[in-house]
Image (cartoon, grey):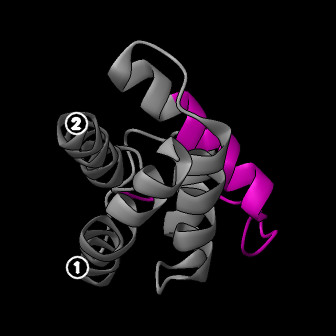
């Protein structure tokens, strides 16, 4: 059971440093909604893992991203699946915190 959690956590870490690593344009709309972030997380994780991720885990991860210190621009890059975004040091630290603090909990809770 631990192996899938670690696999998914590493996939999100990859997601965090690729799709949220940069400078996307949010069109001046501010912080994207949790649903928009969830769509981006679902798409990026499905691409990384070759399949769907449980909705409960995606929703939990999206909420953790939304509630984090990730900038609005970084969060928009996650929502958009923007692989060219260059994350700031602050966004990378926030992403790392999510992976280490929230990811395992989200995946464990979704597996129940």
Number of other residues with Cα within 10 Å of mark 2, as a class: few under 14, some 14 to 19, many 20 or more: few
Q: Is residue 102 magenta?
A: no
* Residue that numbered label 1 is attached to: 89
Q: Is residue 8 above or below residue 66?
A: above
Q: Nearer the viewer, residue 23 or 38?
A: 38
Residue farthest along the front direction in this orientation: 112
Q: Is residue 31 above or below residue 17?
A: below
Q: How many labels does the image show?
A: 2
Residue 67 located left or right of residue 17: right
Residue 24 located left or right of residue 97: right
Magenta part of the protein: which range? 22-43
Q: Are marks 1 and 2 in contact (CB under 8 Å)?
A: no
- Residue at x 34%, y 24% (from the top left corner): 48
Q: Which of 85 and 100 is in front in this view?
A: 100
- Residue at x 31%, y 76% (from the top left corner): 101
Q: What element carries label 2?
A: helix
Residue 103 located left or right of residue 76: left
Residue 107 located left or right of residue 59: left
Query: Distance of mark 1 from mark 2, alpha carbons?
Result: 24 Å
The circle drawn on residue 7 is: 2
- Residue at x 47%, y 78% (from the top left corner): 70
Q: Residue 50: x and y, percent?
A: 40, 12
Q: Does the magenta stretch include residue 24?
A: yes
Residue farthest along the top direction in this orientation: 50
Q: Quadrant of residue 25?
A: bottom right
Q: Residue 89: x and y, percent?
A: 22, 79
Q: In this view, does 5 lie above or below 86?
A: above
Q: Nearer the viewer, residue 5 or 22?
A: 5
The circle drawn on residue 43 is: none
Position of the N terminus by quadrant: top left
Q: Nearer the viewer, residue 30 or 8?
A: 8
Q: What element carries label 1?
A: helix
């Amino acid at each position: 059971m631990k192996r899938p959690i670690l696999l998914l956590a590493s996939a999100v870490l990859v997601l965090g440093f690729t799709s949220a690593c940069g400078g996307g344009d949010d069109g001046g709309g501010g912080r994207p909604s949790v649903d928009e972030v969830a769509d981006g997380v679902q798409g990026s994780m499905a691409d990384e893992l070759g399949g769907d991720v449980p909705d409960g885990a995606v929703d939990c991860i999206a909420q953790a991203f939304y509630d984090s210190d990730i900038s609005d621009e970084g969060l928009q890059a996650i929502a958009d699946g923007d692989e060219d975004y260059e994350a700031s040091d602050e966004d990378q630290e926030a992403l790392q915190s999510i992976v280490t603090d929230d990811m395992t909990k989200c995946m464990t809770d979704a597996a129940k």
